[in-house]
């Protein structure tokens, strides 16, 4: 059998939980410590989708988000994308459009999913459900509300992306 390997880029403003999401999915851990980088280019996890073995390689940005300095090497060859914003950070929500455009400019229209993270902090929300759903609709993207902290919907996000990739 030919193994399927998918490079997944996880993008969004700083502090929305991208590194945490990658660690949660690939290592099964969550830490409160704000780590700017996980020290490697990517972490991986193997899953079975429709009886097929799929290796997901989740690429982390080493905290260069704020400097607009994410290198072409980061996006190069990306086959799927997670766009992340945070329940408690309005700017991160407003930045989704430009993140999408950046990814598209580098690698074109790849399977992409929109994620609202930190849904455990719903009482502190600064984003209305209708707005988030409207954005997903406008961008024609599957939308997940997730909590990396509570391990809510994280595996679903990546399963969806893998399925979407295999369907292409
Ligand atoms: P990144 O800059 O996008 O990589 O964000 P990080 O993964 O470094 O996370 C930033 C901060 O948000 C850290 O303190 C995390 O522990 C915290 N965090 C990440 N996900 C969640 C979540 O689902 N809920 C809550 N309450 N905090 C989270
Ligand atoms: Mg990070």
Image (tube, rainbow, N blue to C red):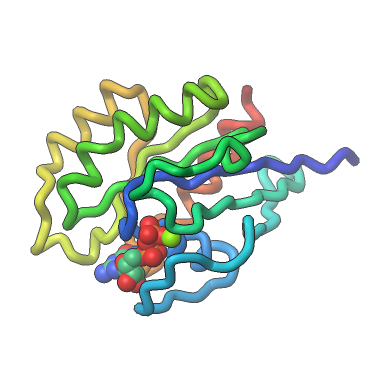
- Residue under the point 39% across and 49% down: 65
Check the image and name the residue furthest to the right: 1
Front residue of this view, candidates 34 and 47: 34
For residue 157, side relative to residue 43 (left or right): left
Front residue of this view, candidates 70 and 136: 70
Tell me: residue 155, above or below residue 80. below
Tell me: residue 94, above or below residue 137. below
Q: Quadrant of the N terminus?
A: top right
Percent position (x, y) of residue 147?
33, 62
Residue 152 visible in the snapshot: no
- Residue under the point 63% across and 22% down: 168
Percent position (x, y) of residue 90?
15, 47
Front residue of this view, candidates 162 and 106: 106
Q: How many marks?
A: 0
Front residue of this view, candidates 15 and 162: 15
For ligand 1, give the image quadrant.
bottom left
For residue 144, side relative to residue 38 (left or right): left
For residue 146, side relative to residue 41 (left or right): left
């Amino acid at each position: 059998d030919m193994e399927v390997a998918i490079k997944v880029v996880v993008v969004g403003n700083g502090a929305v939980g991208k590194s945490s999401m990658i660690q949660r999915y690939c290592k099964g851990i969550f830490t409160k410590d704000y780590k700017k980088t996980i020290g490697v280019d990517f972490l991986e996890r193997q899953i079975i989708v429709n009886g097929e073995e799929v290796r997901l390689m989740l690429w982390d940005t080493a905290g260069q988000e704020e400097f607009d300095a994410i290198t072409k090497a980061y996006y190069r060859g990306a086959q799927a994308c997670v766009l992340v914003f945070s329940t408690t950070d309005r700017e991160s929500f407003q930045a989704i459009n430009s993140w999408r455009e950046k990814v598209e400019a580098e690698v074109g229209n790849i399977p992409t999913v929109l994620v609202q993270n930190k849904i455990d902090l719903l009482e502190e929300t600064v984003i209305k459900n209708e707005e988030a759903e409207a954005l997903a609709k406008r961008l024609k993207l599957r939308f997940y509300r997730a909590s990396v902290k509570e391990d809510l919907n994280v595996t679903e996000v990546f399963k969806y992306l893998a399925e979407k990739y295999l369907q292409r």
